[in-house]
Amino acid sequence: MKNNIFDHLLNFLKNPHHRNELKSFREDQEMEEAFDTRDLGLKEVEVDKIVGSVGRYQDFDNRFRLKTGIPSERLMKIKQAVRDGKPLPPISLYQIKDEYYIVDGNHRVSVAKERGWKTIHAHILEFLPSRKTIENILYREKLDFQEKTGIASPIELTEVGQYSYLLEQIREHQESLKVIHDAPVSFKEAAADWYQTIFLPFIAIVEKSRLASAFQNRTTADLFAYISLHQWKKGRDRHYGIGLDQIIPKNMEEFRARMADKKGFEFPEMRHLMTAFVLISVKSGEEYKIMEKIFALDEVKEVYDVPGEFDLIVKIVMERDWLSSDSEIIGYFVYKHIRKIPGVRKTQTLIPTFSKHKTNGKQ
């Protein structure tokens, strides 16, 4: 037990963030076995992602303030240049995964942090991690995907091999575009079209549903890969997603054509109105007070005070998405908004399976 406490304390003290120090590039490079490089050129980098230094990680704290507390002459000159509106040259950074380490420009980053800059112009040399961890394998797969497709926006997947499936999708889409346009289409052109006309509309559907909340350790891109694999490639039957086929057809190109008719990723077929009747027994003498509280709920359309075993009959009309069942949505609403009202003794919910309506005396 004492050894475990000692090891935990030692690891805590070794962590540069706990020591109020910058991260050392050499230490992280060794840990990640990051020795292969690629030049990324000039880019805008988020200042918050600059976490360490190559040569001066011991001179600054983890907020890039000089440890001595005494501004150096170099720092004062940079501050004055910024006040005078003079442009600063790009800094030089090493990158390991999503973190950056300063090669040249420690004082410029210090000023950027102090002034609350969001980004800074930098020349980047990336060091690719080769240590065999799931995280590193996924990172290299993501880099390979970005290089082949030219898609700059990050698509985050959490399972090894899924990027290969997305590349396969794009290759199939490339062949389809060649037929549609009767002309050659490059892989990157097909990737850009796939991203805009297939991936983003699909993600919009996932985000409008409640599916993502049911898989909190997965990304929306994970759900895209999983659902599209089973929907478009394997054609497997599902045990979830009410009315899924109404929105996502069995063919990827058919999905693309259907989404082309949508404006701003609107999916009215995802919305379904449902009606239920709730019978409520309440404490004697509190019928009117409880009736008023229930009637104030937006989903409640009608309330009746009746004699018999139950005291109130409530008609509710709700909207559900294509992933939820009527009983699930209505049951949750009754539990959260009706059963918790003081004085409500018991409820019984009736969900119609079939109905007929008359308007002005006509069916």
Image: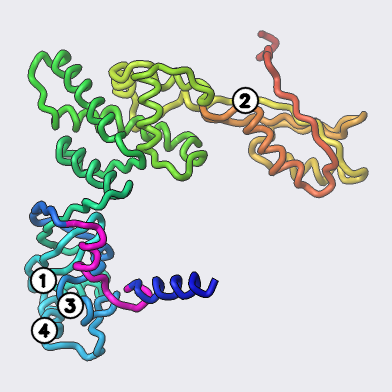
Q: Which residue position is annotated with label 4?
A: 74
Look at label 2 and name its amino acid: Met
Q: Which residue position is annotated with label 2?
A: 274
Look at label 3 and name its amino acid: Arg
362 relative to 81, above or below = above
Q: Secondary structure at mark 4?
A: helix
Residue 18 counted in the magenta span:
yes
Q: Which residue position is annotated with label 1?
A: 104
Q: Earlier in the sequence, mark 4 or mark 1?
A: 4
Give the side of residue 203 with respect to residue 343, left or right: left
Distance from label 1 to label 3 (Cα)? 10 Å
Q: Quadrant of the C terminus?
A: top right
Distance from label 2 to label 3 (Cα)? 64 Å
Occupied quadrant, residue 122:
bottom left
Q: Which residue position is annotated with label 3?
A: 56
Look at label 1 and name its amino acid: Asp
Q: Residue 356: x and y, percent? A: 68, 12
Q: Secondary structure at mark 2?
A: strand
